[in-house]
Amino acid sequence: MKTVLVGVGQAGGKIATALSEFDAQMGFNSVIDAVAINTAKTDLSSLPIETVLIGQSQVSGHGVGGDNELGAEVMQSDIQEVMGTLSSKIHANAESIVVIAGLGGGSGSGGAPVLVHELKKVYDVPIYALGVLPGKDEGTMYAVNAGRSLKTLAREADSLMLLDNDAWKASGESVSEGYNAINKNIARRFGLLFAAGEATEGVGESVVDTSEVINTLRSGGISALGYASSPAAEDPAENINVVMSAARNALLTGSSVPGATDADSALLVIAGEPKRISRKGVEKARRWLEDETGSMQVRGGDFPVKSDRIAALILLGGIERSNRVNQFIERARQAAKEQKEEDKKKVDQKSLFQNDELENLF
């Protein structure tokens, strides 16, 4: 899939960069171009991709401080400049545009839905969003922002590809180490998905192409991506269980949204050397995926690459009813309630200093 990446906010810019670098390193050539947009000048200065600083008249390059309503307002006010920059990047051969954002901050969670809405007015290709949910330890404001942004992006985008930060965060890592590891995981998984059918080693029996990715995401709403790999023998007859194991692990332990198995549609991509891929294993894995997801729309295909491993990518479309998504929405609701109560306390405390009875003390 030929795609243009647009990172909004700090996390969005870093992920767009990581995806672009992974694609170049692997020689897939599926990423046509990448742009980072932010309200904070310092977050853009270290990025090697083209950048756009917005909101200079409102926040003077200092960011929106986690205020996603201000993030949306800034994006809307500077949308012509943003769209002008993107028009030179989005060529006729683009098959999709992916807007990437962390859903907990201010610039990304507020600005990304506004940008997706504008892009859909202008371009005929699918406009996808790749959104990262904040971890449980990131605070009330981040959960509230993400709850708002998740619903809006899921409505505006052709599909919101969701990633739960807590899924890939290892214990004992520092904050910067944790995010760097997460960004690399995102780049590997989604980079392989975007590259499927683009640059391949050898000829597979049934090579997946862009239309199968688009059709899997056609139902809209929220989607998830799973990935896992295992060492493979040279004889494909010995790799039936290898293919099955990779598929099981991709869905059950390697998903970007853990626990999301019920889906409207699914795509199973088996990556590896064609001579090592067991056709029996692929068919068996596909039938298992149909049973596990409850979907009759399960597509499949190969991704021929030079490797002594077999990897499985599983793309799920329409996972809104999954427990993990419902749990997060409930957590966001609770966080919004707590924030409202906290704001009320602040107002009550402020009123103490507006009491006329205190005037005679001064």
Image: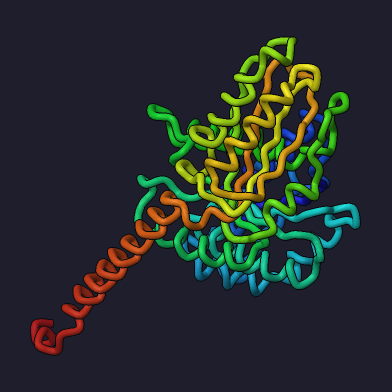
Front position in the image: 218 or 180: 218
Residue 298 in view here: yes
Q: Position of residue 242 (x, y in %)?
A: 62, 19
Front position in the image: 276 or 83: 276
Residue shown at the point (72%, 33%) measured from the top left: 22
Q: Is residue 154 left or right of residue 18?
A: left
Q: Position of residue 184 (x, y in %)?
A: 61, 33
Q: Position of residue 181 (x, y in %)?
A: 54, 31
Q: Is residue 342 left or right of residue 134?
A: left
Question: Against 338, is 184 above or below?
Answer: above
Front position in the image: 345 or 290: 290
Q: Position of residue 232 (x, y in %)?
A: 67, 14
Locate residue 76: give its quadrant: bottom right
In the rendered view of the protein, which quadrant contains the C terminus? Answer: bottom left
Residue shown at the point (31%, 62%) measured from the top left: 334
Residue shown at the point (60%, 47%) measured from the top left: 316
Question: Against 307, is 179 above or below?
Answer: below
